Image (tube, rainbow, N blue to C red):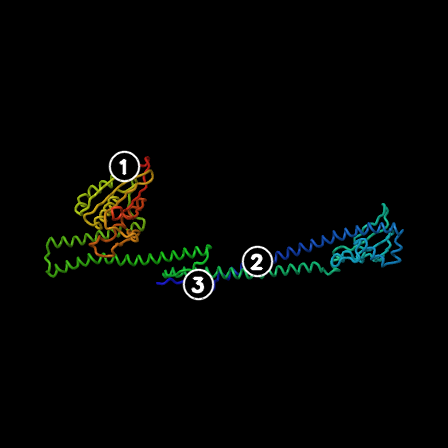
Amino acid sequence: MRPRLFRAPFSHLGVKLFVIILSVNVAIAGLVFLSVSRSLDRGFLEYLETTQTQRAETLAEGLGQEWARRGGWQWLRDSPPAWERLVRQQLWPGERQPPHGIERRLGDARDFVLHDAEGLPVIGLPPDDQEMASELHWLPIEYRGQRVGTLGYRPPQQLMARMDRIFLSRQQRNLGIIVASLGLASLLLAGGLAWWLGRRTRSMALATRSLIEGDYSARLPERGRDELSRLARDFNMLAATLEASREARTRWVSDIAHELRTPLAVLRGEIEAMQDGIRPFNEDNLHSLSQEVGQLERLVADLRLLSQSDAGALEVQLAPLDLAASLASRLEEAGGWLGDCGMTLTTSIQGPAWIRGDTRRLRQLWTNLLDNSCAYTTSPGRLDVSLTQDSERVRVIWQDSPPGVPEASLERLTERLYRVEGSRSRASGGSGLGLSIASALVKSHGGTMQASPSPLGGLCWTLEFPALVADERTP
């Protein structure tokens, strides 16, 4: 079945992400606008307060010197326009025209009031306008320690009211533009991110649902090198593994059915022949039936052992034992059997080699390896078994003579019911479960079992078991 790629244009998660991201950004922009606007308003007023006070002090000092030079304030009463020129000269000396904008507002002659030493107005408010006079800030005008008058100036709040808060409004408008731009950028960012992330997560959700429903052909597009891309690759690997597992399970059931059908068919044929009188009911025919029943029993026992291994319930009673003695004993017993198969046995076993093992299960392991060598080695053949050890591992090298195994098939030799030649004939080597059982037995002892080409021309098995330290060797 061709893998199906999942692409989803719409995602509820994407909508939620869009709303959340946009809301957070809008809230942040609003808080920034309020805090900056408030800070700008307060800071601007403080700036005006300081500037206006400094200018008033400068003007008061200059007015004191003018009073001494002119001999009083009468010249200002006689010529009111001279007041504006005097203020301009004191605040902006050397300039024909005062600056524009805020600076001009802060230095406007109309914002200052001059009273003489008796409190009578020279320029500005009449003496009876007490309400307006109370809103002004007053500075004494002195000359050589003598008070010659009083200068009043408007506070920043009144200046701001007069200027209609032009400057502050302009800055707030610029800040509003910045916040609006930030909101638009947040909108685009939230929309793009929500669409991109939601689309990919939606695809993953649909593909996962397909796996739950048993469609293992589902695949996700792999783009980029981010975490989602790695997750997509892991998902595709999981889907491929599940698909391969289902195919293997299907083949497993089919192969088991085939293996069971063969002895059952022989049994049925033998029994029907006896019932029909074609074959006599004697000891030889009963022995043939007994062999087929024994074959069925071995097959069922092998299947039970593998199922226990898969479930982690294989009965293995581990205890300190000498692996070298176990191997040498079984090979010695099998000498006659190997001779009948036309095989010459050569051993190089260095003992003792202590591991934690089960004597019965290890004997079953050596028997399965012997069965495999006898079944697939051309007579006359050779079997070479060696055992070496170091401080951490005990290694068994089991190799035989031709025929060999193609390298492409080496990794599949421990698969259940797998045969290199692809034949299902029972005469070519039993049920095909022997090496699977051997691998399961090695794993139950904490070891590994690896296949490779043999220098003798056949197959080489390398078995490694964890070695016991000296303190653990007491049975």
Location of mark 2 (residue): 25
Amino acid type at mark 2: Asn
Residue that numbered label 3 is attached to:
7
Give me the C-alpha separation between circle 2 and circle 3. 29 Å
Tell me where residue 385 sits by quadrant. Answer: top left
Cα gap from disc 3 to disc 1, whole angstroms: 62 Å
Q: Of residues 381 and 186, which is closer to you in this image? A: 381
Q: Residue at x 30, y 36 (%)?
A: 473
Q: Secondary structure at mark 2?
A: helix
Give me the C-alpha separation between circle 2 and circle 1.
74 Å
**Number of marks drawn:** 3
Task: Name the residue located 18 percent from the left edge and 54 percent from the top edge.
Answer: 292
Q: Residues within 10 Å of mark 1 (few under 14, many from 20)?
A: some
Of the residues shown, which amino acid type is indicated by label 3?
Arg
Q: For this view, does 465 lie left or right of residue 345? A: right
Q: Earlier in the sequence, mark 3 or mark 1?
A: 3
Q: Relative to 60, does residue 324 appear above or below in the rendering?
A: above
Q: Which residue is mark 1?
A: 352
